Every structure is written in structure tokens, then in C-alpha cells.
Image (spheres, grey):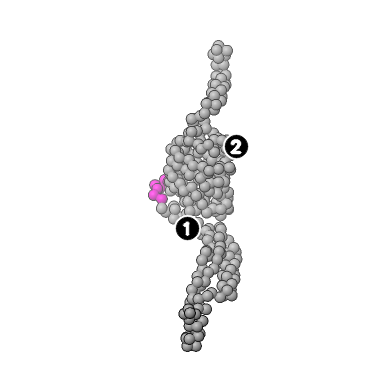
Amino acid sequence: MGGPTIVDRMIMMPLGLAIQSYNWVCDLRPKPSDEVHLQRQLKAQVQEKRADIEKSTEVRSIQITLNSVIMNNPANTQHLRGVSGASFSSKQELDNNLVRWKNSLSISSDRLEHVNTAVSRIRKCIENRDSALNLSGLKLPSLPSDVLENIRSLRELDISDSTFSHVDASIFERLETLTAKNTALKSLDLSRCLSLRNIHLQGSQELRNLTFPPRPIALRELNLDLSGIRWKDLPREVKNGPGIYIDVSKLTFPVTTVATLAVGFAAGIAATAYCNGAFSEEKLA
């Protein structure tokens, strides 16, 4: 014969103790009705908060997610998992970051005017939700990355003549056109910039490392004239990319490209000689 079963043991226990034990077991189990009510209540609060946020003219973006709700404590303490509140950058926050960037720069008084011009242009871009921002010619020592990466309307950026050697590439992830001519950039990681169609890096002679997306399907124009990037440095996906115009003049060319340029160069000499009144059959011979 086996020993007493769980039911036998409960029958042998005093009635009050059995009822207390039974109640304790029940308390460990979350009530489905309570969980459903909590989910509905939480969703209602999130929707109400989102409605208030969307009414604000200061909001640049909103991200609200609700994944799941779990109750796993016998003391009826609710634990929420996977719930994130609203995340956005207001105009005031962007402006605060812009001022903080300006104050962090160690620059001479004659360069301060250029920085003030940059601040003014960035503020105007944010206020008007412009798609293009021109910061060229200002010789900026750095960029306010936490500001530029949060301008949702920005699609074209010109940072030509900047003096910084490295930059946070997250600024460029939303861009379609990037112009960085005659800069001091040494490396540029564009691997996450899937929307870039036009890249202008002419004259950036210090540039040695240029990274593209694995499949640069959006790229249509790449200008590298007089930059530090050579034809041999370009990945195969860019060289063989359909519909991509690449300006590789004054770089290391493939043989076919050299032959094409030689013909053009000879034609240019002939045209110049003709314009100078020195064009003759004897000289051509």
C-alpha cells in the first residue's frame, strides 16, 4: 500500500489550516480578469498621453510601444515588461543642444562669427522645416550631431570647408545629398546611409577611408575629384553599380578610362591652340 495522498493529508489536517493552505495556493495565480483590466487601463493611459503629445507644436517625433504585461508576484504586485513612453525632441531641446554645442567650442573671436552664422542657419532650418542646410565656408571645427540628426525634414547638407577630421555619421542617415568639399575629413562611414543619392567629396585630400552601404542601391552620383580616395579604393558594388556616375578624374584610372581621357586631353590641347591663333597643319604634324 502506498502512503497517504495529498487529498488524504488535507483531510487529516485541521479544517482551518486546510482552508488557509488552499487560499495561499490560489493567491499565487494571477487572475485573468485582473490582467485584462490592467492591459486595457494601461492602453487607455498611453492613448491619452499620445493625444496630449500630438497636440503639442513642439514635438518632432513620437515613439510609443506596448509589448506585453506580466503579473508574477503572489502579493499582487504588477510588473510591466516591454513598455516605453514617449520619446521626442522638442524645438526647445534642440535649441538647448545647439547652444551647448556652441559653448563647448574653443575658438578664436574671429571664428565666433562663423559659428553664430551656423547656429542661425540651423535654427532657421528647424523653424521652417527646410530640407536643405548650407554650412559651407564656415570652417566649423565640429558639428552639433545631436541636433542635426534630429532634424526630420533634412535631406541635403553642405559642410564644405569644415576643419574637423572625423564626424558622427548618424547625421547623414536621413540625407539624400551630402556635400563635403575641401574638408579635413580622414574617414567617412556611410554604411548606414541608405538614402544617399549624391555624394560630393571633391578636394578632401586627407580622406583615406570611405565606407558605403553593402548595397548602395540609392547612389546615383559620386564625386571624388582631387580627394584622397582612389579608384582602386572603391568597392566593387560601387564600381559596378548600375546607373552610378563616378567622377574619378585625377585619380588612378582603369586602362579604358585613361584612353578615353587621353583623347579628350588631346582634343583640349588642340582647341586651346586654335583659340590662341597657333593652330596649323605644321604644328599638328
Residue 274: in sight, yes or no? yes
In-front residue for pair 28/259: 28
Residue type (three-letter) at the residue carrying disc 2: Pro
State the CA–CA distance, disc 1 to disc 2: 44 Å
- Residue under circle 2? 242
Q: Which mark is residue 196?
A: none
Point 55% across, 21% down: residue? 266
Residue type (three-letter) at the residue carrying disc 1: Asn
Q: Against 91, is 260 above or below?
A: above
The residue positioned farthest toward the top in the image shown:
282
In-front residue for pair 273/211: 211
Q: Which mark is residue 96?
A: 1
* Mark 2 residue element: loop
Location of residue 31 in the rendering, given as x and y in whole percent from the top left corner: 56, 75
Point 50% across, 83% down: residue? 8
**Left/right of residue 198 with respect to residue 103 in the rendered view:** right
- Marks counted in the figure total 2
Residue 123: in sight, yes or no? no
Q: Against 24, is 162 above or below?
A: above
Location of residue 69 in the rendering, given as x and y in whole percent from the top left corner: 54, 68
Point 43% across, 41% down: residue? 186
Which residues make up the magenta segment? 105-111
Q: Against 127, is 278 above or below?
A: above
